[in-house]
Amino acid sequence: MSRRHAVPAVLAALLVLSTGLSAAPAGAAVVDPPIPSLTTVPEAPDHASERFGDPWDFGQATDVHTWTGAVMHASRFEVAGGQLIWGAAQPSHYWQIWPGYPGGLRLGREGAVHPVDPTRHSRVSLHLYTPIHIGGAVSFLTCVDLDDPTPGCKTQSTFIADEGWQVLTVPVPTDRPVYGMHIDLPTQTPAEFRLDWVRLHGTTTPIAVTLPRGLPADAELVVADAAGPADVDRPGRWSLGRTTELPAVGAGVQVDPSAWPPGTYRLGLAGAGLLSGMSAPITVSPAPQVQILDPDITGGEDFATAVRGNPWDFSDAADIEEVGNASWELRDGALHAVNAPGGPTGQLDPYVILSHPPLTTDRYHRFTITTRYEGAFDLRDAPGGGAHGRIGWMQADEPVRWQQTAELVHYPGHDTMTVVMGTQDRRAVMEHDLAQPGFGTSLPITRLRYDPNEDRGARRWSIDHIALRADDETRDGRFTVRLRDAAAVPGTTVSLFADVDAAGFDGVPLALDVPVGPDGAVDVPIDTRGLTIRTAWIHVEATTPAGARQRVYATGPLQVIPAGPPPAADVDRVFGAERTETAAELAELTHPDGAGTVVVAAAHAFPDALSAAPLAAALDAPVLLTATAQLSPATAAAIDRLSPSEVVVLGGTAAVSDAVVDVLRGGGRQVERIGGVSRYATAAAVAEALDAVVPGPARPPVVVDAGSYADALAVAPWAADEGRPLLLSDAGGFTEEVADLVADTIAGLLQLGGDPDPVTIAGRLASAPVAGVVGAADLLSAPSPAELALAATARREIRDRVLIASADDFPDALAAGAAAASLDAALVLTGRSAPHPATRTWLAAADLDPLFVGGPAAISDAAAVATIP
């Protein structure tokens, strides 16, 4: 069963930004310290903390991959004393996010398993020490494979580093998922570099800082942690830049603390002939670091325990049918072995065949192994190499005698890996060129085998435990979700949701605002008896009292076993089996005779589809939804029926791929993509497109919080009726795209004379002061999204129909805003599990025909019946 591959070549070095910290001379003039406007800010979202519950602070070796291929031209590379120490005498780099070896299975923390979402984590910050002035770069891989030749797969952001400690921040220059990231320092002379931390992060609340007046041009604003001054071994202070280079308004500047790890900081001023005292402390409050422990990738019931009655824990010889090409013994609850001599060629292929009765793969398919390897890491086909194994099996009556997975790369020391054998394409885990049927056929497996390595030498190894598990499952409609918050602070709460996939954070609520215990552990019993999703991906949103948030999916699904039939309900619905089908059904309702234009948006994220409603109404076009990588079948069928001549695609390639656009161009259709580098930029681009379609001067936009799908849905039909664009912004203030568009629109209207209508700020964005508002604003607020929908409906002229969508579950409601505008129908919101009282009261007084948008997963039958008086 030996299948060998060479160690792949890794990417070459690249490079290059920020300023160092100058120290004030003795006897420097003392000025007043800076005055920050805030004393507490929430930590910005951090990729490593959210994905692994473990920031890249180099407190442990798992923070960085140190093996062959992941580090290039380093004379020293180790994690020690809470820092990454990196020596080089020539251009070198290392992978902070290792994409994985081509040809091997993607496992563990590799970037192919944990891609970066650049819409949430848009910047990279390095706390770097360098003894020399040097240019460098952070390089990004947006294709899964290292050797993928596709143009645009590799991109970078450069920086310049001065001598000493500094914090450097560069943008992630892509809107596509990132599967690998390496840091490049092209030194030509021997040097030892140090990294105190690396953060791949989003943004947080900016701090307005008041500075003394009359500062010299070379004055520097510095930040220091609470521990004291900086030195080589304890980086504690760095420059935020010269005050003349910072965005200044009078004597004030804006400081962005997004790069700062949780902790306490003070600001000061330094420069030639200048020194200030330190400011009042600023606390960066830690974001949650929640990990879902159950359900998880390892799964639930173990085959060997449940069926054999004896787990494969190697506590006795009954666990083993055969060990080949190795000498071995059972000791201390593990199988210990060393490769046997391989004859004249040195060919070895050690293996372990597990003892078991015949097993079927329809349930047990999560293979987890805990191993230990001694010696150096090496993948070469030579003695001391071959540090990769694989899983093999034989099936009764199968023409292919033995089948095997692609390589599992093993690293020295203990290593635990889970291979999901039952993937949707059962060949996805197979050796790619053997054309084997895979682990998903109905034939029973008669022999299950693990090959630990392909080392031609006398490699020592051991196996502690092997399990073959089913997915986690509910019992009688119930399951307990186990969580752990590694950065728990008092007052943190978690909300749980169930999704049809592990993308988009768009699931239906299961439990809301559950307190996290003081030790960070929390068990949340959930009731799934009303849940129509059969394979549920649990995701969590955790929120601290300071407003820091984290969102994370479970690493494995939960199989929801029905506990009984759902209650019958006599309600009218428009819905499909999933969101793309629901959008197609709405298009059938609004455009029974076809449409000249259709708007297509991503199915797994709400911002683009919701900002589409005014443009879709102006174009008399339905909104359809699609998966990112391929055109969804329901959408393809709807387009065939509607027979449009034009298609408008919303969002960049990370939302709707070029492959989908190519399919949409079939039949001679004209396709236009409207998108930007972020959801905010896409909404602004849609607004500009709307201005080109709607006659007359541009209309002031309606602005909602980008994090509240229900707010956007509630006002979308009214905005569409008015021909007003729907823009998205952050809760704390207008984004640059929004501010620019609002300013341009108001300026244009003023040039035409008269008083333009004010900008409308709607929903929860209207309940607090918003930075960047131009002129007086029309505030459309309400205590809840359901009441906001009623307030927006009061501004409309509607016919005799009302669409009722979910205030809790956006997938089925994505196209409802455009549909309500097209039908001149009211759009109101209700709860998934229970009616909203305000909506029920309003419906009791209204003489309208109700139509629910979405199936029971969006609005349960019981809630639907109770919503209609």
Image (spheres, rainbow, N blue to C red):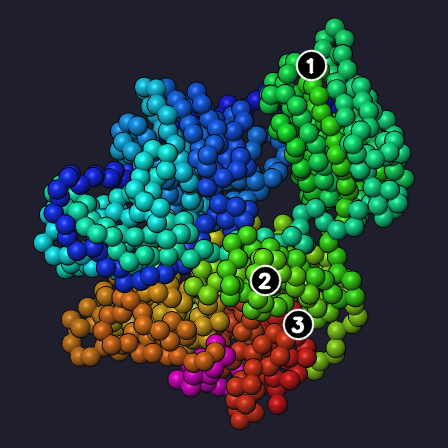
Question: How far from the left and from the top, in percent, is residue 530?
Answer: 70, 71
The kind of residue tagged 3 is Pro
Question: In the image, residue 577 lies at what x, y percent?
Answer: 66, 64
Please tell me whether residue 251 is drawn above or below residue 844 in the rendered image: above
The three-letter code of the residue at mark 2 reads Gly
Disc 3 or 2, which lies upstream in sequence?
Answer: 2
Residue at the disc numbered 3:
856
- Image point (59%, 52%), residue name: 291
Q: Is residue 789 magenta?
A: yes
Q: Is residue 712 visible?
A: yes
- Callout 1 environment at 10 Å: few (<14), some (14 to 19), or many (20+)? some
Q: Is residue 213 left or right of residue 368?
A: left
Give the residue number, with chain letter if any, for mark 2.
517
Quadrant of residue 163 within the rendered picture: top left
Task: Tell which circle, 2 or 1, labels the residue nearer the N-terminal end.
Answer: 1
Question: Seen in the image, is 594 located left or right of residue 401?
Answer: left
Q: Nearer the viewer, mark 2 or mark 1?
A: 2
For residue 640, what is the image quadrant? Answer: bottom right
User: Mark 3 and mark 1: span between their CA atoms?
Assistant: 60 Å
